[in-house]
Image (cartoon, grey):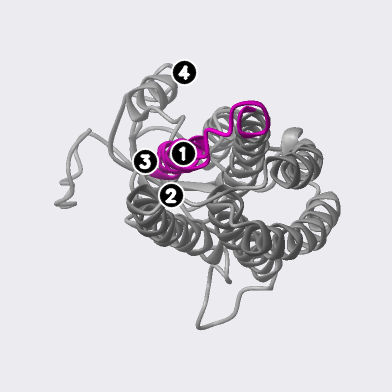
Amino acid sequence: MGHHEEGHSHSHNIQITNINRAFKIGIVLNSLFVIIEFVSGIYYDSMALVSDAGHNLVDVISLILALLAFRMSKIQSTDRLTYGYRKTTILASLANSVLLFIAIGFIIKETIERFITPVHVEGKAVVIVASIGILINAFTAYLFLKDKEKDINIKGAYLHMAADALVSLGVVISGFIILYTNWYIVDTIISVIIVLVIFISTWQLFKDSVNLAIDGVPKGINIDDILNAVKEIEKVQDVHHMHIWAISTTENSLTAHIVINKNMDMRQLAQLKEKIKHKLLHMNINHVTLEFETKDEDCNDLSINR
């Protein structure tokens, strides 16, 4: 006895118009800052500025990829792509984390060279440029603050911008130290700190992205909690062969076999189906496919029994 049903949108959906605007503003502001920071870093021989400019350039690319993915995810599904392009949001998140690892490699290479051959750094210029970075990165992070827990790409953008603001603050501190002590090695030390900050935030984003890409259970969802919640619903005798995965960075899917009494009529079955869908929707499961069966039926599903 098989019945399939798909849940629909939930009240926690992201306002795509607001996110589009946030990404566009972030892209423009950070692109301008990358140019300012890179030119200033070359002119004043500041490795901290050059390395942070490289990181910010990757962030701009990340924002562009995320924006494109969001737009593609809204394209209607087709006969060939029955889920549309929703999965592109996950691929964008994964690509962004890989790009950040590449940026880390670049910064490490340049930092090692500066450790071997320290150079004079203009502290005042570093302070001015990095202060601009604090304002731009903090403002961009604020644009994503409201929706950061609703989507991994938005959270990634927020974390990167917030981290960049803190890194720029560190560069300002190094500039002041250079101004008053002429201890130029501090510029390179700040570069090392930048690498650590980027790596920590990127590693978690990478793990979450890989998990979604291979159809793992999305972060924040406990399959045992979902299983128990469905079993608690009246007239559900048992649940097994449950699978949960993400079809995008904002939408999750579930399939499961629901064991019911063989005497249940179609009206009761429809009511039960709606109860299950409603409960799962409030547990962040948007698309639900259920197969109903009785204890007497021989279930041939070879997947892991939960």
Residue 270 in the image: state x and y as whole percent.
56, 40
Q: Position of 174 compared to 80: left or right?
A: right
Mark 1 lies on a secondary structure that is: helix
Which residue position holds label 3? 217
Depth check, mark 4 against mark 1: the one in front is 1
Q: Residue at x 56, y 36 (%)?
A: 277
Which residue position holds label 4? 234
Mark 2 lies on a secondary structure that is: loop
Q: Are marks 4 and 3 in contact (CB under 8 Å)?
A: no
**Amino acid at circle 1:** Ile
Q: CA distance from mark 4 to mark 1?
A: 68 Å
Which residue position holds label 1? 185
Q: Are marks 2 and 4 in contact (CB under 8 Å)?
A: no
- The magenta span reads 177-203
Depth check, mark 4 against mark 3: the one in front is 3
Q: Earlier in the sequence, mark 1 or mark 2?
A: 2
**Amino acid at circle 4:** Glu
Q: Residues within 10 Å of mark 2 (few under 14, many from 20)?
A: some
Q: CA distance from mark 2 to mark 3?
A: 48 Å
* Res. 237 image quadrant: top left
Q: Are marks 1 and 2 in contact (CB under 8 Å)?
A: yes
Q: Residue at x 54, y 82 (%)?
A: 79
Residue 227 in the image: state x and y as whole percent.
36, 26
Mark 3 lies on a secondary structure that is: loop
